[in-house]
Image: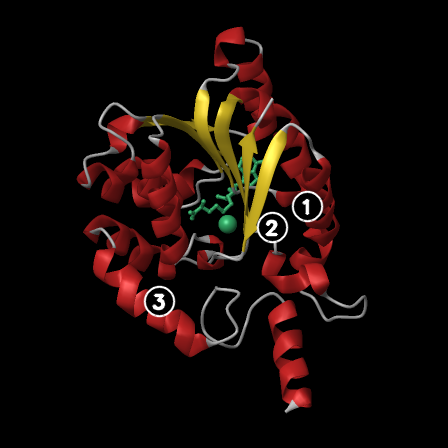
């Protein structure tokens, strides 16, 4: 039993789990229960369509799982968010979840190096009637953020910023998005438990990309924990999401 548990853990640390889902929950049955009971029955038809389209894409592993989409949507509604930013769009599951949760005059500044991924989901977003809320900009996020920061009016302009792109840049993003989000606003960093690998023993058989980015994820987690500008809360939703409320 103990051996089996260890094997399971090793498989999971290798960058995927054998349970057939993306959640960090160790029980497949329990995760399926959440999906079947609370998530799928409430998932917007367009989100379902976008999710199923993305499941056929080679990088589907990157897509936000639907329970996390549901969580983001709840959060945005509770906050009354209107002006948001997303760094790392892929085919747009979290983007569409956000767009559907925002009021009709809500806005999302969406940044991604890859427009082709975004365009895969775009027809579905258009059909959902929320494309007018999205301002997509193609390119590496860092220079785009620096450009935004040149205009004082952008500082403190955002209610919510979701960071879900290149993990080795999260700390660079953090320094910038903390000035762009308003005091009392929220930043969400995704994948902060990095497939469970944050607790991997040094000799764990990790996938190359997991191993390469792991030090960056750990460094971010440490940094956030001591940053007095923010209040934090790390949740085991999806692959781990750390919420940061800007205090000063
Ligand atoms: N939020 C998405 C998943 C994002 S996956 C969803 O819900 O499905 C990570 C994305 O980050 C990819 O689309 C990738 O193209 C993008 N990315 C990687 N490096 C980037 C960078 N330097 N700047 C902006 N986007 C980047
Ligand atoms: Ca993610």
Dot 2 crowding, Cα within 10 Å, few <14, some 14–19, many 20+: many
Q: In the shown orientation, is residue 45 left or right of residue 187?
A: left
Q: Which residue in the rendered view is the most extreme toward the top?
A: 152
Residue sitting farthest toward the bottom: 1
In what quadrant of the picture does the N terminus appear?
bottom right
Indicate the quadrant containing the C terminus: top left, top right, bottom left or bottom right: top right
Helix or strand or loop: what does disc 2 sit on? loop
Q: Earlier in the sequence, mark 3 or mark 1?
A: 3
Q: For residue 15, say whether it is visible.
A: yes
Label 1 environment density (alpha carbons within 10 Å; few <14, some 14–19, many ≥20)? some
Kindly report which numbered mark, 3 or 2, lies closer to the viewer in this rendering. 3
User: Label 2 to label 1, Cα distance in Å?
Assistant: 7 Å
Which label belongs to residue 3?
A: none
Residue 75 picture quarter: top left
> Circle 2 sits on which residue?
192
Question: As displayed, is residue 25 above or below residue 78?
Answer: below
**Residue, x 68% and y 81% (percent of image)?**
6
Q: Which residue is mark 1?
A: 221
Disc 3 target residue:
34
Lower sequence index among marks 2 and 1: 2
Question: Which residue corresponds to the image point at 66% horizontal and 58% vertical from the top-left?
Answer: 210
In this rendering, the answer to whether 1 lies above or below 98 is below
Q: Is residue 213 left or right of residue 93?
A: right
Residue 146 in the image: state x and y as whole percent. Answer: 60, 18
Mark 3 element type: helix
Q: Position of residue 78 (x, y in %)?
A: 34, 37
- Left or right of residue 5: residue 59: left
**Where, by quadrant of the figure, is residue 80 drawn?**
top left
Find out whether the residues at labels 2 and 1 contact each other: C-beta distance under 8 Å: yes
Q: Residue at x 29, y 27 (%)?
A: 133
Q: Secondary structure at mark 1?
A: helix
Pinpoint residue 180: horizontal percent, then vertical percent. 53, 21
């Amino acid at each position: 039993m103990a051996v089996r548990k260890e094997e399971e853990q090793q498989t999971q640390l290798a960058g995927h789990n054998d349970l057939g889902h993306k959640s960090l929950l160790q029980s497949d049955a329990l995760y399926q229960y959440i999906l079947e009971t609370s998530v799928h029955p409430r998932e917007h038809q367009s989100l379902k369509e976008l999710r199923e389209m993305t499941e056929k894409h080679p990088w589907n592993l990157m897509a936000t799982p639907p329970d996390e989409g549901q969580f983001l949507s709840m959060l945005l509604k509770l906050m009354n968010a209107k002006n948001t930013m997303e760094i790392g769009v892929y085919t747009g599951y979290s983007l569409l979840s956000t767009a559907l949760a925002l009021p009709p005059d809500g806005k999302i500044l969406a940044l991604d190096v890859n427009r082709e991924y975004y365009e895969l989901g775009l027809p579905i977003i258009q059909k959902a009637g929320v494309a007018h809320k999205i301002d997509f900009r193609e390119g590496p996020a860092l220079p785009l953020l620096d450009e935004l920061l040149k205009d004082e009016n952008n500082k403190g302009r955002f209610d919510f910023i979701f960071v879900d792109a290149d993990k080795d840049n999260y700390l660079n993003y953090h320094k910038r998005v903390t000035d762009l989000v308003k005091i009392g606003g929220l930043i969400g960093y995704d994948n902060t438990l990095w497939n469970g690998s944050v607790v991997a023993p040094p000799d764990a058989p990790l996938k190359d990309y997991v191993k390469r980015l792991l030090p960056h994820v750990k460094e971010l987690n440490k940094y956030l924990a001591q940053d007095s500008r923010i209040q934090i809360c790390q949740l085991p939703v999806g692959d781990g999401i750390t919420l940061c409320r800007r205090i000063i």
